[in-house]
Structures are given as structure tokens and as C-alpha cells.
Amino acid sequence: MVRGLLSGGTLVTARYLRNDRMVTKRLRCTVGKKTIAFIELLICADIMHWPASVFLFSRLPFMQWHGAGTNDGWADPANEPVVCASRRRMPVAVWYCSLAFGIAIVQWFETLPSPTLLILIGLSLLGICCVLSIPAMLPIRWLDRRSHQGEQYYRSQRDQPHQRNLPRQLQHHHQPQQHQRQHQHDCQHYHQGLQRDPCTPPQPGPLPCQSTGITKHHARGRVSQSERASAGAALAGFCPMLLRLSLLGLCVVSAALYSVWRAQCRLADSLDRHLENRPLSIQLRVTGLPRDLVNGWAFEAQVLTHAHAGRLPERILLRWYAGARSGPYAKPRRPAAGLPDLRPGQVWQMTVKLKRIHTPRNFHGFDYDAYLFAAGIRASGSVNGAATLLRDESCRKFGPCIERMRFELRRAMNGVLQQKRFGPVLIALVMGDQNGIGNEDWKIFNLTGITHLVSISGSHITMLAAMGSLGVFRLWRHLRLQGKLLADRRPAQMIAATAGLLVAGIYSLLAGWGVPAQRTFIMLAILWLSVVWRVRLKGATLLSVTAFAILLLDPWAVLSVGFCLSFAAVAGLMLWGARLQRRVSPAGTLMFKIGYGLKEAAAMQLFMSVALAPLLIGLFHQYAFVSPLVNAFAIPAIGALVTPLALLLAVLCATRLWPQATIWLADGVHRLLELTITGVRVISEQDWAALHFPAPPGHWVVLGMVGLCLFVLPKGFPGRILGLLLLIPVLFYRPPRPSAGDWFMTVLDVGQGAAVLVSTRHHNVLFDTGVRSSVDNDSGNRIIVPYLQAMGVSTIDQLIVSHSDLDHAGGAGSVLQELAVRHAYAPFALNYYLEREQRALARDIRLKAPQATYDFCQRDVAFEYDGVQFRFYHPFGIAGMPLKADNDHSCVLRIVGRHHSALLSGDIGTAVEGRLLAAKPPIPPTDVVMAPHHGSANSSSPAFVQAMRPTVVFAQAGYLNRYGHPASKVAARWRDSAQWFFDTIQAGAIRIESGADGLWVNSARLSQRRYWDGF
């Protein structure tokens, strides 16, 4: 565009103020190739708002001069640029927000947009920009013909402040009566043009107040000069606005194209399907910190070489077990007992079995697929057999070297903290390794809203950077070199800012370079540049540039919860700081000032708790009412005392300078942390500590945040109180419930297990509780409870455990502990089963509702809720008090509503199916059927399938499970009989709604599809 417009020579025009006079400089020059390149660089620099852009061309109306022209044609920093209303520079934050938005929006697409389409859209927008720039280059003559009137206009602004609304030519003092009406008419047209483009000088021709000339124009049937000025101003004001919008669209499309390119590169780094679940001999390097499992290691690795035909991803997640894989009742055992000591940077030759990333997908809850994709991990698997250590490359590359330093620091701290209850929390405070923190501790932190205190957040990094900067500042001001103070050679502020940035960078790397660490370091780096360049940055500019920089480095950072919370929290703090700047610090005694400071701190904490409420409700489906109270003493205790002492402990552990002092310090800091968390636990046990909310739709959360932004605007802003109305949908949202006589069914994706929620108008029935794979990992606390809380369900009216296998009863303890269960059915003694679980797991299961009752599920036992009937068809009878029940003793439940029926079959086989069909009365045909035993080959007999005549059939199974569920012939049998057959492997969680309009079916993988699904 620039080359075409400037190739034949052009007129460069600059306007600036010198000695309170409006000066116009014009220079016609022939533009060569180097000059064109320089002009292009300057224009691009202004579009990106780099500090290097100090010169603009008035022929491009979407830009504004950064400097002012001088007699020699160079920028004069002493001259202040004239900023006009319509040609005022678009805020820098808008440009960077558009770039960040273009990168982020791609991550929410179901399929990647075509790069060719994006390029065509970008070229179209570029063409629009070129076309819109042409009209602004045609009317050049008015610049010299009206420069004198422009000078008079600005002189009137200076000399007569009370008459700034009109230029001197339009100021009405003693005009004749016959010219009064025409003068008002012309002034009105002048103001209309001025509102559209106040920088447009008066048009050539007679002044509006010269009515004689105007009368002649009207007499000849021509348009008056005032109308012409208004039309010119409208055109000049419309083109820049449309041009700015086109440029914003071009920025969004360009950023989206970059994001698509990064996504295609990551999708190409995948595992070929024919290599899945096969022994593969590969050479790999250990990356990241190895994590202790119950009986082995979990670690990330980089694939270096392999000899297999096909693609292997570069980064994989592996588990290495000592001997046989640990069972659900296995006691924890140190990996060192049977496995080598893994360290980052080691290169191994291993035989592994890999799978593509395919984790359970539900309508609510943590998306582990997205987490691993954002981390660049494209396959997971296990190590088979022995492995050979080839070499150690920890010091050859920067990344492995940093990870080895983190590993050694963790090992040194574990030496003094391993036997302490909250030792993992102290390690997390120092280096961001949260793997050792237990589920019970996380529950307390989430309920009280202090998760940010036990994670590496911006406050930790900023505190360290401030301490380092302050120390260097004071040292630099007192040190001398060759008899001269160092502060006289280099400014102490510059050196201190550089030292603080270095400290922040080193600590961010040691902390794992997470999203909060990235955000804080980039902000500090931008502030450091502002100190170096002596530029004052606005808060919005700082946030937008930081977001763009983070997404430029890692486009998938937007998928993390920390990204939203970090920027929302910093924006809230900046907003609170702006409110404080408008206040005057009170004068008084020291105690009065301390009390005032405490009051302001409490007000700030309350403000932040309220400001983040919609976002916290949308992300975590709960709000901690005790958060301001807990943070009031936890922030000073953990942030100001525990964290600095923990960092000092890390230094002593790493250097081993004073072993005895290290032990004393470890005991003291752990005792302080223990007292703090004990107080937090006492508060978290209160019933009013936190309130669970149903998960509102995303657009309601956005409206709630907008409403809070409106509410915190300065007093007197119109519609400020109305912002609170936008919070109502977030606070009072309730998911839809079925009508009386109808039912909703949610088939949860729990992997190789079963869990089904049936909801009526006012009641909830949970059939099975998922799988438990280890002592502290079950579907109840990972999937079922979070989903029920997101749906606003806090009470289970009937809990039905079909049998005692751990893929159906594994999460029963977590469900009974977190939700109020009124009654439970099972084919075994569920209460005795829970007691045995407590002894085997060495875990205290405290029931949420101790008054819950238990019964056996037997044939013809029935109950009814809201017009929906529930009846058991199996087992036929139970003798004694069995502590276990196998597959053939599974509960079979039939649900009959006003319009449709459903059958939940458990793990029955073909023999039980035959008994159910031969019984009197037999099971009638059913609309929705759970495929028995996850669709195994020894179930779903042809007679049973034919007798059911279902409309919808579903099977619950895990990806590439060792049992081969669902069997291909069984799936084909059900597909031939039913209209739809779903399995949770392909569909994820399934939602079936029965109503007068028929059966409505939806799946999580279909409704929440992302472009990386299936790759």
C-alpha cells in the first residue's frame, strides 16, 4: 500500500505547536526505495505502537503524529503533538487486545479454520484499508488555503477559554439582526462537522458569518460552504473510523493465522494409530520433575530416536511401576525400593506401550485432554520390562539444566521436610511442585479461597523482585569504584530495576514457568523497559501487552484457569489502586494511620473477593464466603512470613552451609504453617464457609463481570447501579429440570466403570459410583461430585450400587462423604462394605448425612418420585448379609416415566438375561437401555436385544481397555436393533432427556468438541 501511494512523489505535511502558534510544514519529495522501506517501518511501528514510531503522515488519517516536524524535517521532542478528537490515536491496549483475541479465539474452535480462507480475509481487509486511504489523500489544498484560519482557531482556544466552543470567525458578538438566524444555522453545521472530525480545518470559501457570499451561493442553487464543511468533516471522520476497524480486523485475522499455524504444528506431532498399545523400543530423555506414585514413577519424556515405521510424538507422559501395577488397596511404597532414581536430563533406552491422549470427557469438570494438549504432551503410556541408562545430558542444554536444579532442590528440601505433615506445601511455596499435596489439603484450600497462597503466584515473584531490587539499590548508592560512586556512573534506579528483573526471571524458571509466573515476569519486563525508555504505561496497556506476549509464546495458555484468574485479579488490583489515588491520605497519629491502613487492606480484600465472584462461580461452581476472613490472617502469615522463611530454608538446603540451623528453621517454619492451616481448617468445617452454585453458561459469567466493571465506576456514572442487575443471572441460575412424570438421564464418562444420574422434577437417583484405581484416586471425587455440584445437586435421594466390583462401587465412599445421601440400595451390606474400605485404605470416611439408611435391592422393590416409577427386576433374592456381590448379582433397575422408559442393567451376563426374560412377568420392551456389562461379549444375547426393542442404547467403557469393551459384535447387534448406539469412548458423557417431544440425546464430545479431538 505504501509503495503504491508514495512511488511517484508525495506531499508530507506536519502540524505542531511552537510558541503557542499553529505551524504547518509541507515538503514535497521524491521517495526512493530506502525511504519507502523506512516509511513502511514507521507505519508498521505505529500500528504496533512501538516506541520507535515518532513520525506519522497526515495523509493516512488513521494515524496521529507522535512527534512534530521542525525546519530541518526531523522530529523535535520539545514540541507537543496536537491531539484531536477524531484523529486521536486508538488506545494501545485495543491493538494488543485484538492480537491476543485473535490468538485465543482459535483455541475454542471445533475445527481449525482454513489458512487459505484466513489469508483471503486478510488480503480483503488490506484492500479495504488501501481503498479507504485514497479519499483522505485527495483534498490536500485546504491545508495551505486554510492554515491561517487554523492558526486563528487555536489562538482563540488559548486567548478566550470561555469561548472555546467556536473559532473566532464564528463567535457572535454584535451581529446585525438580519444575520442572526443564518449565523445560528451555519454554526450548527460547523459543530456537526466538528463533532465528526474536530481536526478538519474550515473549508475554502467565505466564512459562515459572511452572509453575502452564502446568499449568493444559495441564490445560484449551490451548496453553502458550511454544508460543504460539514460533509467534508463527515467524510473525513467516517473513513478513519472504518479504516481503524479494518485494521483491527486485520490484526485479529493475522493473529488467528499465527495461532492456526502453531496448532497445525502441534497436531502433526501425534502418535500413529497403528503404533498404539504396541511394544515400542525408543530412546528418550527425562524432562520435568519425576512424580512419586504409589508404587512407581510418573514422568515426562522427550522422544529422541526410534526405529519404527510411523510417527511418534516428541513429548510423552510415562508411568514406570515397580513389578506389577499397584492395585486399589496397595500400600504406598518408595519407588527407590525397586526402581532406579530418575533424574531430569538422563537419556534411557526403554520399551514402552503408548496410547493417544483420550481421557474421560464430561459436561462439567476438569478437561484433562485440554490440559495435556496445552502442555504439548501428545501420548501417554507405561514402561515395560527393564531399561538401560545411556548417558546424562543435564548440563548440555538449558532446559534440562534448569529441571535438574529444581530436582536437586526438591531432594534437598525433602531431606528435612519428608516426615512433616505440610512439607509438600512448603516445597510448593518454593518451587511450584504441587504433586505432593493431598486431596484433603486441596479441599481445605479451595473451600477457604487461599489456593493462590500455596501456589507460585505473582505476589511471590513480585516480592522477591522487590527485595532484590531494594537491596541492589541501596548497595549501588554506597559502593565506590576508583574513588567515584557507582551511582554517578549508572543510575541506581536502572541497576536496581535490572537486578529485580533478573531475580524474577531466575525464580520464575525455578518455579516451573507456569502461567502466573509468565504473566508476572513479562509485566516486570515491560515495566523495566518503561524505566529504561522513560515511558509511562497505563494499566490497560500493561495487561494487554502481557496477554499478547504470553499467548505469542504459548497460544494454549488461555486454556488454563490461571490465565483468567491472574489477569482478572491484576486488573482488579489496578482498579483498586486507581481508586486509592483519588483519595487523600488522612493526617493523624501513628495509631490512626495504622488503623486506616488496616481498614483499607480489609476493604481491598473484600473488593477483590466480590470482583472475582462471577469468575470463581463460573470456573469452580462455588464461592467461599469466608475468603475475606481467612485471607485477612493467611496472607500476612503465609505471604509475609512463611514464604520468605521457606525460601531461606531452600537456600540453606541447597548450599548445606549450616545443617543444624537448617533443621531448626525447618521445624519453625513448618510449625508456623501448621498453625495457620489449622486455623483455616477450623473455619472451613463450618457449614457457611462456602456455597455451591450451579455452573452458569459462559455468556452469563461474562455479563456478570461486565456488571461488576460498571458498578465500580466512579460515582455519578450513568447506569452504574444497573450493573448489579447483570449479576442476577450468575447468582440465581438454575439448570433446567424435567416436567412432572418425565426424567433426565446423564451417563457419566468415568472410564472403565459405570455411573448414571437420573433426575426427576425434584429428586435425584444415582446408579453406581464409578471406578477406584488407587488409594486416593476414584471417580467419586474426580468426576461424580464435581458434576453434581455443577448441576446444583447437593442431595441424593437414592444411591444404588449395582454390585461390589470397584468399577461400580469405587467412588461410593467419596459420594457419601461429599453429598447428603438419604437412602441407598445394594445387593450387599453397603454399611459393612464402607467399614471394610476404611480399614483397608486407612482413611476416615465421614458421611455427609449420618442418618442415611441402607436396604437390599431385590425384585419387585419399587419407589416413585414425581410421577416416575423405579422398580428392581434383579436380583431375585438375597440370603444373609453378604459383604460382596459379583456380576450376576447386579441390581437391574427399570425406570418408567410418562412418555418413555429406561433400563439400567449393571454387569449381568447372558444367563441372568435369560432368567429375566423367562420370569413372570418378563421385562417389557424399553426405550433406553444400558448395554449389560459394558457391552462385553458374554452379555447382550440376541434374544435379550430383540426383546428390548430400544430406541437408544449406551455402553460405558474406557479407551483401549484390556477387556475389549464394548465388543464389536455386541455393538453391531445393538446398532441393528436400536436407532442410536453410543459408547462413552466416542461420545463422552451422554445426556438423555425424556419429554412429550420425544427423546433428546446429547454428548459431551459433540457439544464441547475441540479441534484436537481425535488427533
Image (cartoon, rainbow, N blue to C red):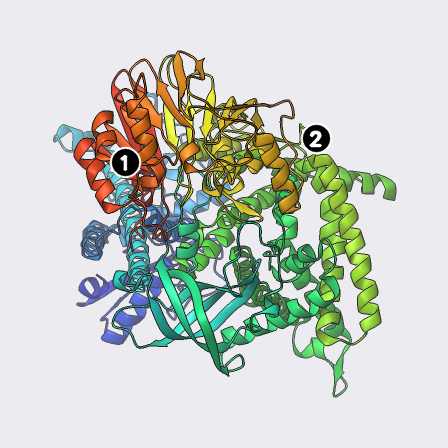
* Residue sitting farthest toward the bottom: 482
Element class at badge 2 = loop
Q: Position of residue 956 (x, y in %)?
A: 36, 40
Residues at marks 1 and 2 touching, judged by CB atoms closer than 8 Å? no
Numbered label attached to residue 940:
1
Element class at badge 1 = loop
Residue that label 2 marks = 686
**Nearer to the camera, 734 or 1006:** 1006
- Relative to residue 235, is residue 212 depicted above or below? above
Numbered label attached to residue 773:
none
Q: Determine whether, in the image, residue 241 is placed left or right of residue 485.
A: left
Quadrant for the N terminus in the image: bottom left
Sooner in the amino-acid sequence: mark 1 or mark 2: 2
- Dot 1 amino acid type: Ser
Q: Residue at x 17, y 35 (%)?
A: 976
- Relative to residue 717, is residue 54 depicted above or below? below
Q: Position of residue 1013 (x, y in %)?
A: 31, 50
Q: Determine whether, in the image, residue 424 is placed left or right of residue 666.
A: left
Quadrant of the image occupied by residue 594: top right
- Dot 2 amino acid type: Gln
**Nearer to the camera, 456 or 811:** 811
Q: Determine whether, in the image, residue 970 is placed left or right of residue 495.
A: left
Report whether residue 470 is seen.
no
